[in-house]
Image: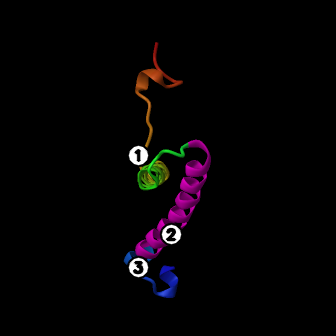
Amino acid sequence: MVIMGLTPGVSVVAWTITYLLIFSVVTVITVALLKSSMLPNSDASLLFVYIIVFYACEVSTFILVVLNRAFVTFPPEYSLHSRL
């Protein structure tokens, strides 16, 4: 997107809005299904908040795992060429 002249900030805002809308639609459908079948006595707004927070935690964990730049190194005593 940078090649088309889009700044990184605009790209992040567009990505956030797009996926927030997708997660909201999926959450509304999930809440409707849960409210009609498994949890008829639950408040729909509480279910919505609980599920949207769950989705946000999943996405943030995925981003942290995928974009982590840490290198995994082993101590010398665990290497294949360690001295005896």
- Local secondary structure at mark 1: loop
Mark found first going from the N terminus, 1 or 2: 2
Please state the horizontal and vertical placement of residue 77, each as a whole percent of the image: 43, 21
Q: Camera-side residue: 63 or 14?
A: 14
Q: Is residue 22 above or below residue 42?
A: below
Q: Single out the residue that lies furthest toward the top.
A: 84
Label 3 neighbour load within 10 Å: few <14, some 14-19, many 20+? few
Predominant SS of the magenta segment = helix
Mark found first going from the N terminus, 3 or 1: 3
Which mark identifies residue 10? 3
Tag 1 and tag 2, C-beta contact below 8 Å = no
Q: Which residues are magenta?
A: 12-38
Which mark identifies residue 6? none
Q: Camera-side residue: 49 or 71?
A: 49
Residue at which label 1 appears: 70
Q: Residue at x 51, y 83 (%)?
A: 3
Task: Tell me the CA gap for discs 1 and 2.
Answer: 32 Å
Instruction: Give the amino acid type for the residue marked by disc 2 in the picture.
Output: Leu
Question: In the visual, does 50 lie left or right of 81?
Answer: left
- Local secondary structure at mark 2: helix
Locate residue 25: give its quadrant.
Answer: bottom right
Residue at which label 2 appears: 21
